Amino acid sequence: MKAYTETGGQMQTIRVELFGTDPRVLKTIEEARTLSVAKASVLITGENGVGKRSLGEYIHTNSNRAQYPFEVVDCSLSAQEVENRILGFRDAETGRFNKGILEAGNKGTVMFANIDCLEEEFQKRLHKIINELEDYDIDVRLMASTTKNLSKLVGAGRFYRGLYQMFSNNVLNLPALRERHQDLSQLAKHFMSELSEKSSSENEIDNVVMDKILSHYWANNIHELKQVISSSIQNNSSLLDESIYDYNENKGSVYRGEDDSDGIKLMSLKDAEKLLIKKALVHTSENRTQAAKILGVSIRTLRNKINEYRVEGATYFVNLR
């Protein structure tokens, strides 16, 4: 399964497993193709695992910078690690200076993944540095990705407006996989075929299994789908087995029970509570006061719940600022 688009007179292959064939996805890919010929900065939005980094690499690969580096830094790492990765650092033992991605990516593309996670003070510093790159003969095309609504974070005073404006003119969005049942079905079959071939095993997805796949929430989207199918093949497990869908903090989440003939998605009350709180925080760009109002609880109750989920090690809440 491959989709094609023409760029510079050449047919470029887009791997469907990284994107999809939903009209909204195809529109985003077309917009990305158009942007690939320019130097303009790009912001790619969407949930975890939808292919934001892959889309950024697609833009780079189809640009006139393709022969130069494509450098990526995950801004959700520790503040010092992110700063070192961007600006460079001197090795304490050898004294050797390691270039940062802005210098190493000269003439190529630099992508700030999860840019919303940058420390607020460093956001301002980075904005200033980017504006001065020409003074150091550094020419890079800038891209960023986020799972958050940066505009709301700017309004809440949690993201530097100047840095946001560098990327806000060209925004590409990749919709969640659970909103694209046709893509979900096609990608599941594709991964099953691809991974089965690699393992020299024979597997297929029947209607019962597909119903199971379509009913799952897929909080980590395409990445999670591939991991679940890969796990089932490696462990010789059925995709009807609930344990196969255990993934990070989403253990035992969405499933369709035997008596669930109306297709309602079921989960434990605790998991449902956690998911609802997470959705409220995402919807309000992590404004806890607004989230508490939506949930109809006190800010103290919400704070206690967040601390509870942090102690349990739930990834989203551990990283919540």
Image (cartoon, rainbow, N blue to C red):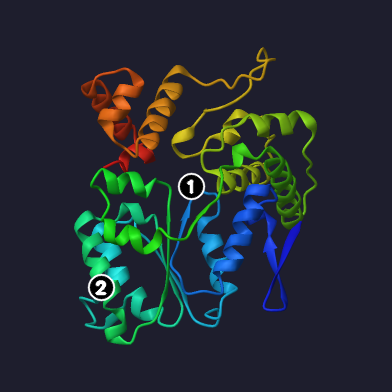
* Alpha carbon distance from label 1 to label 2: 28 Å
* Viewer-side residue, 62 vs 177: 62
Disc 2 residue type (three-letter): Ile
Relative height, residue 309 to residue 261 (above, below): below
In the drawing, does residue 68 fall left or right of residue 166?
A: right
Residue at position x 40%, y 35% in the image = 283
Determine the residue located farthest toward the top in the rendered image: 259
Percent of width and height locating residue 285: 34, 39
User: Does dot 2 land on a helix, a strand or a loop?
Assistant: helix
Label 2, residues with CA under 10 Å away: few <14, some 14-19, many ≥20: some
Left or right: 38, with 84 as reference point: right
| Percent x, y of residue 296 | 32, 17
Which residue is drawn at the image coordinates 26% and 67% (left, top)?
A: 126
User: Contact, CB < 8 Å: mark 1 with mark 2?
Assistant: no
Among the two numbered marks 1 and 2 on one chain, the one whose residue lies closer to the N terminus: 1
| Secondary structure found at label 1 | loop
Which residue position is annotated with label 2? 129
- Residue 245's place in the image compared with 52, above or below, is above
Q: Residue at x 52, y 43 (%)?
A: 220
Residue under pointer 1: 48
